[in-house]
Image (spheres, grey):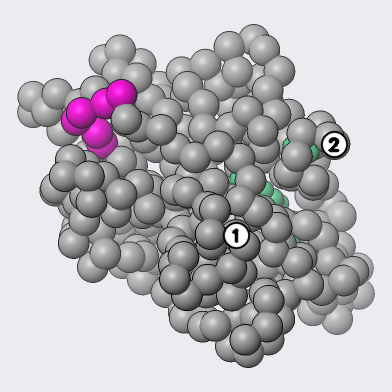
Amino acid sequence: MERFELVSKRKLADRVNEYVVYAPEVARHCKAGQFVILRVDEEGERVPFTVCDYSREEGTVCILVQEVGYTTALLARLEKGDRLADFVGPLGNPTDLSAYKRILLVGGGIGSAVIYPQAKQLAAEGRAADVVVGARNEGLLIYQDEFRRYAKDFYPVTDDGSNGRKGFVTDVVRELIESGERYDVVFAVGPLPMMRAVCKLTEEYSLPTVVSMNPIMVDGTGMCGCCRITVGGEVKYACIDGPEFDGHKVDFEEAMQRLRTYKAQEEEHMCRLRGERR
Ligand SMILES: Cc1cc2nc3c(=O)[nH]c(=O)nc-3n(C[C@H](O)[C@H](O)[C@H](O)COP(=O)(O)OP(=O)(O)OC[C@H]3O[C@@H](n4cnc5c(N)ncnc54)[C@H](O)[C@@H]3O)c2cc1C
Ligand code: FES
């Protein structure tokens, strides 16, 4: 097997694929919460993805990828046996939930890729967490069987009620807290508006909340400044200081604005890929 070869590719939902990549050096060192930066080909842009799972024995790393733009569309065109140009990591800091006993994991959309390894690890340590996973509809809910296996209690929630409770993850989080569940921490990962909503809610209950930030990244080593965010009034670089931060201190408005910086160029790239003229 060649380095960075796709060992498998599996469709999990509409525009969401699971890729297992042969990358023994990454697999040997990575831990839950860290990420990789890959390039699909030599000309490609560098894009970050969370390490969702790994096998040190087989030298493989698993990532879940949602197709949202140019590079993720290129990736979706690859098949088992194809090779990536690079697959660099592990980057960022591993998640550390060791200080907490009762943990609530909350995932929105592709954020499940980040909470899944936590759910698995906490179960292996004998302190399984409760897990809330939200999606727009049933077809977009990923890893349900896996979460059922590793969670203490698993609460799926969909916007349209096609699976689990109808509503948003925040509805379930509020109900759990109001029902008397005494969590020490909430670990919430998903789109920025979802993480912001969870943080606003948990602030009401003074419940510590950790979020995983996903700004645009280039080098992933603290050199380019691209992944700058503001946390508690201080500048932080998500790639080396995070990606996890105290959610009650994150400036979400700024983070959302920065994520839109290259919107025009991203759209232009996609048009070129589809062979459209602007
Ligand atoms: C530490 C980290 C871990 C991540 N883990 C995952 C993961 O496990 N699975 C996954 O599918 N995605 C993950 N992402 C997001 C992923 O890197 C982006 O979706 C990807 O870079 C988009 O590239 P593109 O060329 O396909 O889209 P682009 O055309 O570059 O962007 C399309 C749209 O996607 C949004 N976008 C762009 N970059 C990002 C970004 N970095 N994060 C979120 N939204 C973005 C913007 O709204 C943009 O308009 C992670 C990001 C970070 C920083
Ligand atoms: S990605 Fe360049 S500083 Fe973080």
Helix, strand or loop status at disc 1: helix
Q: Count neighbours of disc 2 (C-alpha within 10 A) and say few if under 14, some if 14 to 19, many if 20 or more.
A: few
Mark yes or no: residue 152 visible: yes
Mark 1 or mark 2, which is nearer the start of the sequence? 1
Image coordinates of residue 109 in percent, x first then y, are: 44, 55
Q: What span is in magenta?
A: 99-104
Would residue 222 appear left or right of 102 to someone viewing this image?
right
Q: Quadrant of residue 7?
A: bottom right
Which quarter of the figure is the C terminus placed in? Answer: bottom right
Q: Which residue is mark 1?
A: 26
Amino acid carrying mark 2 in the image: Cys
Q: Quadrant of residue 71?
A: bottom right
Label 1 residue near ligand 1, CB within 8 Å: no
Spatial separation of the CA atoms under disc 2 and disc 1: 22 Å
Task: Identify the residue at image location x=26%, y=64%.
Answer: 146
Amino acid carrying mark 1 in the image: Val
Task: Identify the residue at image location x=61%, y=69%.
Answer: 23
Would residue 234 appear left or right of 42 to someone viewing this image?
left
Which quarter of the figure is the N terminus placed in? Answer: bottom right
* Residue 92 position (above or below residue 99): below
Q: Which residue is mark 2?
A: 224
